[in-house]
Structure formats: structure tokens, C-alpha cells
């Protein structure tokens, strides 16, 4: 039961094949089993979770109207505010933080019937390529505890892969839902920037020059769960000023007639053979389904990773310190401290020129829509790395991912292969802005033909 999809678990509840209490208890038991090794779940209240589940069972018994996630146990990244569990964002100033209310994303999932059973680990303020902080420690990869689940939504990916939760919500500024999905063999969606309100996230939309890079996105074992969560999470909340009322379409159900390009070398780094092979396999799946497939990378992506790095690091020191001051953290942990110390100091004119470059890049990428519907590429050049190889900021490691934060395109990661060491390999499936329906539909095809999620060995 812990490895079933959220959609199927909700269907089983509706058919009265399993009670909400049984479902929640099974996932709490699974967390008990795996979390001593993983350290993925950092806050829980079992008594409260089971009480909510009992009320959900009572509502079902009397025929009350229920939502599409009724009774489904979920976890949430510890940077997303929750009224009934602590939200620390992995920083000392929030060690005892109890939010006054739920983030918009949380409220929407609860309204759909989901039951929150825990919070998942993140690097401090979500800034890090691994998942470790001074408040909760380090999270390990369920396929090999010597390896990192990556970051920053590493706790979410690890517990999903281990069967302790059916759905989680992460945040993504440069790959933070996609890289952990790849490292832990699950699926994740980075929506179009501005699709999902950031209201109630520790790193707000108002985050200086890089505020437009971050979005919340669902993480799950199966693409169908991403599609459902995307429907529930998207749309304005009247508080996040950057979210327009764009309709959400159902995922496409066929790939015939699409135009896809794939690449495994972005001009700065080439994917290792197992990763490159998974991308090629995904491209072959689409070709077999009637997609016009060609190898190649859109021209505007050349140099875009370096532009992302300049935007992210310019003013980062003062930007991060403003958040730390608001949260009451006087001394950041080593990882965040190094990022502050390594930030670039540039003039206002320099920053203005960078923002102009970003706008020109986004326009150039939008012009590519006349020639393509789908892009396939690696998430990172290699499968999950050992913990000691995750030290420091390696922007080359993020190069395949961060460019899509810069242009705002939606991206789905789905498992498409396995390395010789038995590690999962994901691929990125990107589509033009607001076309999550294409990315999700293509990902579902790749999942169906290449097998998708495979549970880690006991």
C-alpha cells in the first residue's frame, strides 16, 4: 500500500477498501521504519494526524462531499508554512517557529482532503544542492545512504521514494524539485513560473531580482499524481501578485504531431553515458509514438547557465541577510554562510544590465515555440552523488536545470533508466510556458513505456 499512487489510494478510500485511519497509520509506520536511516521527515504529530483521519472516515460514512485526495497522507517541505506543525526552513531563527496559518498550497491540498503527516527536510532557507542544515541534520538517499538525495527538496524525494508519503510539495529556484526527483527515482513538476502562489513560503516572491525564479511544485512517485496536484495548486489566491488566472488543461493523451528536440551536452558539460542513454531512450519512445524528434539544443540556451549564475549571485549576500534578519537567524549555517561570503558585488547598473539580458533571453526562448513543443535533456550529468561530492555551489551541476527557471518554462522529471550501480536516472521534459499539459502528457508516455518508479531495495 505505501507504494501505490495518491490517485489510487484516494480511489480505494472512496470504495471503502481501506479507511483513512488505516492509510495514515500505514504511512506513519513506514516513516518509523525508514526515517532512522534517511532523516527525511523532521516534524510530525501522529495523534493529530490520526484524529484528522478519523474525522475523514466519519465524513465519508455519512455521505459528506469529499475531495479528490480524501484521506491521502502527504508530507510537505519544511519551508512551507503549516499551522499545525512547525516550519523551521532549516534555520536557527525559526527553530521553534509555529506559523499562524497555512500556506496557500497547504490550504488547497487540505481542502482536497489530503492529510498532512509530516514535514520534510531542506537545506537552510532552501539554499543548497544537498539536504542538510544545523537544525535537523543531513538527509540520506534511500537507494544508497552514502549518497545525497540532492536538494533542496531532498527530504521530500527521499521519503516519497521510501514509501512514507504519497505526495509532497517542494520549491524550485534552480532545480530543487527536479534534482532530488532524479536522485531518488520519483517524478516532479516545476510549473511555469507564476502558476502556483508562493504565499506562505519561507523564501517569498518578493526576493529582489531573483524572485521570479522560484515556484512551488508537486513531487510524487507517479506522473498522474503530479497532474492532479497541479490542478489543485494552480491559480491566483489574491495575495501573490505574480499569479495570473491562466486555465489549467488536462495532460495531452497522445504525442503524435509534436515536435521534440533532445540534447545531452549543453556546451559546458556532457551527461555521463547512463544518463545520456536514458535521454535517448525517452526520445525513442516519443518517436515511436509519432513525435517528430531531432537532436539539438535551442540556440538561446547557449550561455544561459552563466547568465543564471550572474543573476543569482549578484546581491545575494544582502538579499539572504534580509531574510535571515526577518526570521531571526543571527548566524547562518556553514553552507549558507559560504554562499553569502561568495556572493558577487556589482553596481546597480550591472544588475540592470543583467536583468535586460534575462528579458532578452526569455524573449528568445519564447520565439523557439514556433519550432518545438518539447525539450528532452538530463537533469544532472550523473546519477545521485556521494555526500562528499555535494560540497559547495557547483553551478555547472545545475546547468541543465537552472536555465528553465530563468525562462520560466514548465518541466517534468520522470524516471527513465537505471545506472550500472542501481541508481535511478530521471529525464527532464520541458514545454513552453503554461503548457504543463504537454510536459505531463509526454512524461506519462515515457513513464508507461520505460517503467517509471522502481522502489529501492529493502
Image (tube, rainbow, N blue to C red):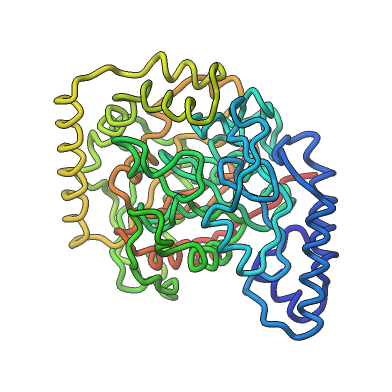
Q: Residue at x 56, y 35 (%)?
A: 150
User: How far across and down, in percent of the image, does residue 156 sit?
Assistant: 62, 45
Residue at point 35% right, 19% down? 343
Of 124 and 64, the residue lying toward us: 64
Work out which residue is located at the far bottom of the displayed protein and give it. 63
Q: Is residue 199 left or right of residue 371?
A: right
Question: Residue at the spot x=28%, y=47% of the render?
Answer: 407
Would you place residue 340 above or below residue 224 in this image?
Answer: above
Give the image location of residue 121, x and y in percent: 64, 37
Horizontally, residue 334 falls left or right of residue 457, namely left
Q: How many marks?
A: 0
Which quadrant: the N terminus?
bottom right
Residue 316, compared with residue 75, is above or below; it is above
Where does residue 76 sit, x and y in percent of width and height?
A: 62, 49
Examine the rendered structure and indicate whether residue 334 appears above or below residue 37.
above
User: In which quadrant is the C terminus drawn?
Assistant: top right
Placement of 323 over or under 199, stated as above or below? above
Residue at the extreme front of the image, as rendered: 100
Residue at image point 45% right, 56% down: 282
Residue 191 x, y percent position in the rendering: 41, 56
Amino acid at each position: 500500500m505505501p507504494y501505490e499512487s495518491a490517485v489510487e489510494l484516494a480511489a480505494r478510500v472512496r470504495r471503502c477498501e481501506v479507511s483513512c485511519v488505516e492509510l495514515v497509520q500505514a504511512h506513519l509506520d513506514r516513516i518509523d521504519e525508514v526515517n532512522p536511516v534517511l532523516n527525511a521527515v523532521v516534524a510530525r504529530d501522529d495523534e493529530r494526524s490520526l484524529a484528522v483521519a478519523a474525522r475523514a472516515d466519519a465524513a465519508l460514512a455519512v455521505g459528506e462531499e469529499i475531495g479528490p485526495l480524501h484521506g491521502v497522507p502527504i508530507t510537505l517541505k519544511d519551508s512551507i508554512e503549516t499551522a499545525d506543525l512547525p516550519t523551521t526552513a532549516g534555520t536557527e531563527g525559526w527553530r521553534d517557529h509555529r506559523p499562524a496559518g497555512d500556506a496557500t498550497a497547504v490550504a488547497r491540498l487540505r481542502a482536497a482532503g489530503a492529510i498532512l503527516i509530516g514535514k520534510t527536510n531542506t537545506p537552510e532557507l532552501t539554499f543548497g544542492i544537498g539536504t542538510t542544515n544545523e537544525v535537523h541534520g543531513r538527509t540520506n538517499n534511500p537507494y544508497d545512504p552514502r549518497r545525497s538525495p540532492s536538494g533542496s527538496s531532498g527530504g521530500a524525494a527521499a521519503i516519497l521514494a521510501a514509501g512514507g508519503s504519497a505526495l509532497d510539495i517542494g520549491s524550485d529556484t534552480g532545480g530543487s524539485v527536479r534534482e532530488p526527483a532524479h536522485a531518488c527515482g520519483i517524478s516532479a513538476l516545476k510549473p511555469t513560473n507564476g502558476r502556483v502562489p508562493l504565499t506562505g513560503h519561507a523564501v517569498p516572491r518578493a526576493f529582489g531580482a531573483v524572485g521570479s525564479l522560484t515556484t512551488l511544485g508537486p513531487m510524487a512517485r507517479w506522473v498522474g499524481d503530479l497532474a492532479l496536484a497541479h490542478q489543485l495548486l494552480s491559480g491566483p489566491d489574491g495575495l501573490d501578485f505574480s499569479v495570473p488566472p491562466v486555465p489549467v488543461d488536462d495532460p495531452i493523451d497522445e504525442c503524435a504531431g509534436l515536435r521534440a528536440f533532445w540534447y545531452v551536452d549543453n556546451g559546458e558539460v556532457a551527461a555521463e553515458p547512463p544518463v545520456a542513454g536514458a535521454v535517448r531512450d525517452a526520445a525513442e519512445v516519443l518517436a515511436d509514438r509519432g513525435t517528430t524528434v531531432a537532436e539539438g539544443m535551442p540556440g538561446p540556451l547557449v550561455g544561459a547557465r552563466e547568465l543564471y549564475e550572474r543573476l543569482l549571485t549578484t546581491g545575494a549576500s544582502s538579499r539572504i541577510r534580509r531574510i535571515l534578519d526577518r526570521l531571526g537567524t543571527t548566524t547562518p549555517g556553514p553552507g549558507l554562510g559560504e554562499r553569502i561570503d561568495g556572493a558577487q558585488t556589482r553596481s546597480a547598473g550591472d544588475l540592470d544590465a543583467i536583468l535586460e539580458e534575462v528579458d532578452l533571453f526569455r524573449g528568445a526562448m519564447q520565439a523557439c515555440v514556433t519550432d518545438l513543443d518539447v525539450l528532452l535533456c538530463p537533469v544532472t550529468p550523473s546519477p545521485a552523488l556521494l555526500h562528499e561530492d555535494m560540497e559547495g555551489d557547483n553551478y555547472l551541476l545545475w546547468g541543465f536545470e537552472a536555465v528553465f527557471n530563468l525562462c520560466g518554462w514548465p518541466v517534468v522529471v520522470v524516471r527513465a533508466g537505471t545506472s550500472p550501480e542501481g541508481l535511478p536516472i530521471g529525464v527532464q521534459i520541458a514545454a513552453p510556458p503554461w503548457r504543463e499539459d504537454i510536459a505531463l502528457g509526454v512524461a506519462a508516455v515515457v513513464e508507461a513505456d520505460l517503467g517509471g518508479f522502481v522502489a529501492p531495495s529493502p
